[in-house]
Image (tube, helix red, strand yellow):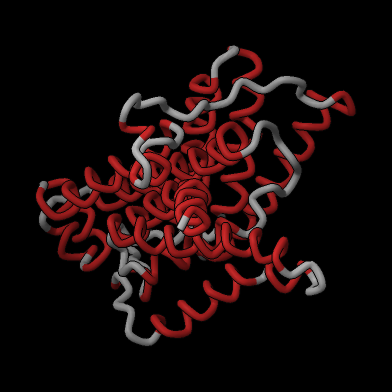
Amino acid sequence: MMMILGLLASGVRFATPLMFAAMGEAISQRAGVLNVGLEGIMLVGAFLAVLFAVLTGSPWGGFAAALAGGAILGLLHGYFAIRLKVDQIVSGIALILLGMGLSGVGYRMIFGQGGTGQVPGFARVNLGVLSELPILGPLFFSHHALVYLALGLAVALTWMLHRTGWGLMIRAAGESPGAADKAGVPVDRLRMICVAFGGAMAGAGGAYLSTAQLAGFVENMVAGRGFIAIACVVFARWNPLGVVAVALLFGIADAGQIRLQALYPDVPYQAFIALPYLLALAALVVTARSAHLPAALAQPYRR
């Protein structure tokens, strides 16, 4: 029982960066913009979070910097994909390369061989008696503040998409941009806002990796999580609450492969590391044919 509880609790923590990135991407895709550059944005977010956490002495300073950096990169993608009508896949791939270069070069230039030293990181929230409950405590009440922020954000985004005028405009921009434009919806401006939000959330996911899950920056530390986040969006049918559930599935798989490495030392560890990615591929194969893409993703809107 304790092993299962530990696995589930670890799965929640491993899932949190996926939740942030996938929720932002779900909103962006709902508005009709695909951003495959999440990997690069998450790397920049992870680097900025460490840099500004050290400079400000607070992980929240690093988190704010990661949000800002991610939003700027999201706007850059939006400028090329929305304003200049560049192919979204090409722009996203360029963003991956840019993010890898900026984070790697920036880390070496600023911190060099000496490393970052002590990085102010997020501590787990102490909820008193709740954290000490035998089963529910480790599972629900002993996580970092960003975990609860991600879960609350998922509820808020789901409500916004389905119960507010903003949500209606976002869905209209993705499903029928021509009709939305004729109805007075500023489609391009709305999409820029959504893609900036998606970039900020990817930056938040990177910040979680470097200031909560770990305590420092390592080049290419995102390790494919940006692509898994995109798989989460498709598998969850562009629903923020569904994204949380799917991200938890991948998080548990990621936590499980670490435990399997210890249980089966004779098996090459690469076989276990591949498990979350194989799960992502399987999910895409199963859901791709039945998934209903926002119409603007299948056929980009051109005014």
Q: Is residue 301 above or below residue 72?
A: below
- Residue closer to the observer: 176 or 294: 294
Q: Is residue 149 above or below residue 202?
A: above
Judged left or right of residue 205, residue 154 is left
- In x, y percent, where is residue 225? 57, 57
Q: Residue at x 19, y 52 (%)?
A: 161
- In x, y percent, where is residue 31? 30, 57
Q: Residue at x 36, y 74 (%)?
A: 299
Q: Residue at x 42, y 55 (%)?
A: 22
- Residue closer to the observer: 287 or 151: 151
Judged left or right of residue 200, residue 90 is right
Q: Is residue 91 visible in the rendered structure shown here? A: no
Residue occupying the far right of the picture: 113
- In x, y percent, where is residue 298? 37, 75
Q: Residue at x 14, y 59 (%)?
A: 182
- Residue closer to the observer: 118 or 72: 118
Q: Quadrant of residue 248?
A: bottom left
- Residue closer to the observer: 109 or 276: 276
Q: Quadrant of residue 112?
A: top right
- In x, y percent, where is residue 233? 39, 64
Q: Quadrant of residue 119?
A: top right
